[in-house]
Image (cartoon, helix red, strand yellow):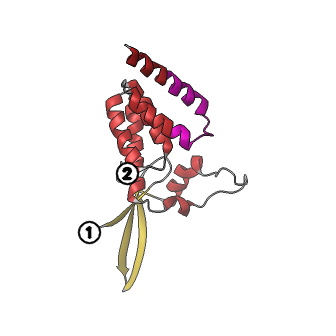
Amino acid sequence: GLQTQGVSFPGHFLIKLSMASSFQGAKRAGEVLIDPCTGHSLSREELEERLQPYRRRPGMGADFEAPLGLFLQPAPARDILARMLRNLKEVHRATQDWPRLLNVLHRLVILLPAVPEERRDRALVLAELGQLDLALDDLVFYLHQCPNAVDVDAMAERQSAWRSNLSGRHLH
């Protein structure tokens, strides 16, 4: 019966617990932020300290600091799932577990169809697994959606190499 919401806090996922209490006949409400890994509630000072490395917003003046409340908004379920999948993505990429990474990327592409970088990442993993025809489909999509991306030249080179490799396979 607890009322909780996920908070996509920078660097660490948090849980916001809504509290209602009565004190001397007056109803009061409040919120507690909990670190789900430790179960500890976090004070405002602890939250401010954790936020400090992420606080300065690009494009704002040097004196501007986004208020703490902006970082404590409840996260939609889709965002929570995407964050969990991206964490798994990094774990599997670090261990070069290509089959598991591919499974995670399939889910991210479905969950986030408007994020072409997930298709690019899936293309790279498909190529690692020797599935160049499927990799090419994703890479073509990425290059079409992101013609000004910083990695467009490198990805275009891969696309060309993969096409050459596929052509060589079909000749044999």
Tell me, yes or no, whether the highlighted magenta stretch contains residue 12.
Answer: no
Counting residues from the N terminus, which is met first, the one under dot 1 or under dot 2?
A: 1
Residue 117 in the image, given as x and y percentages of width and height: 50, 41
Say what secondary structure mark 1 lies in. Answer: loop
Q: Which residues are magenta?
A: 142-161
Q: Which residue is mark 2?
A: 81
Q: Which amino acid does the dot numbered 2 rest on?
A: Leu
Q: Point out the frontmost of discs 1 and 2.
A: 2
Residue 27 position (above or below residue 130): below
Most frequent secondary structure within the magenta stretch: helix
* Quarter of the image with the C terminus in it: top left
- The structure residue drawn at horizontal position 41% and vertical position 49%, both measured from the top left corner, is 82
- The structure residue drawn at horizontal position 60% and vertical position 40%, both measured from the top left corner, is 147
Q: Which residue is mark 1?
A: 1
Residue toward you, 25 or 162: 162
Q: Residue furthest front?
A: 171
Residue 79 in the image, given as x and y percentages of width and height: 43, 54
**Marks 1 and 2, Cα distance to the nearest angstrom?**
22 Å
